[in-house]
Image (cartoon, rainbow, N blue to C red):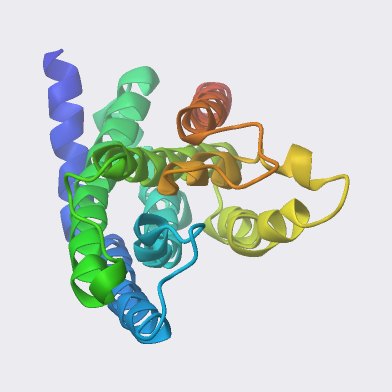
Amino acid sequence: MSSLNAAVDFEWSKVRTVRSMVWSLVLCVALSLALAVVTGAVVRRQYADEPAPSSFDPVSAGFSGLRLGMIGLVVFGVLAVTSEYSTGTIRSSLAAVPRRGVFYAAKMLTGGLAAGAVSCVAVLTSFFLAQATMGEESVSLTDDGVPAALVGAVLFTTLLCLFSMGVAALLRSSVLTMGILMPLFFTVSTILTNVPGVGRAAQFLPDQAGGLALYRHAPDGYVLNAWSGLAVLAAWTAAALGAGYLALRRRDA
């Protein structure tokens, strides 16, 4: 356990000193909060003269900024793993922590904790800012389903960051990893869910399945709900982390 603690301390020092990782976390929060305020203002103006339809969910509307903020978390997760490969410092890191299982566990634990902490800030602040600017359509923290949606949103963003870290450990290239994950998360998966005959299967993609946690009620036609969707994302994450660990063990630095 002492070796893991020392390895975690080693990883924390990397996160704090690599500016690109710090700024990616700042970007996550900034984008999430900015779009939450804009969304709240738009909703308030749109439904100023008439009530919103029964299908409108102020919680998921307030979380719209989280999907944009996820860009920062994905970048953080990828850089946390691949920056050492691009600079060649992976050799000195493995020399300092020769047990690769300990090294990998420390890196994933550190990245997961950082992502979880930032996710808590982004989710809670986004919710309160969006609801404060939404007017009559807003909900409160104690309303039905709201606490569960907040917890689900934190789990979703944290797990997606860990999934990105696992893929990055497998591919070892920031350009290649982000070249795959960015289009998948922010373009391709959304398009696939709207393709007849494909959308039913596309809901099992990691970002689509986990993203159901942002809704208090799953969209029509989905067989997954918030918690089963998170379970699917957790399975994707476990598979990615396992593949990343096998790659680290079997390949030279």
Give whichever of 33, 226 is nearer the camera.
226
Front-most of residues 100 and 38:
38
Question: Which residue is the extreme one toward the front?
Answer: 50
Residue 83 locus on image (x, y percent):
40, 54
Residue most extreme to the right: 197
For the point 58% across and 61% down, which residue is it?
175
Work out whether 186 lies above or below 157: below
Number of residue marks: 0
Residue 132, relative to residue 97: is it above or below? below
Front residue (pair 135, 98): 135
Q: Residue at x 32, y 27 (%)?
A: 103
Residue 125 in the image, given as x and y percentages of width and height:
18, 61
Q: Position of residue 81 (x, y in %)?
A: 41, 45
Relative to the observer, which residue lies in front, 11 or 167? 167
Query: How far across and down, in percent of the image, does residue 127 sit?
Result: 24, 60
Question: Can residue 33 be seen in the rendering of this structure?
Answer: no
- Residue at 31% across, 40% down: 145
Asked if residue 28 is positioned above or below residue 215 in the image, the reply reads below
Farthest top residue in view: 1
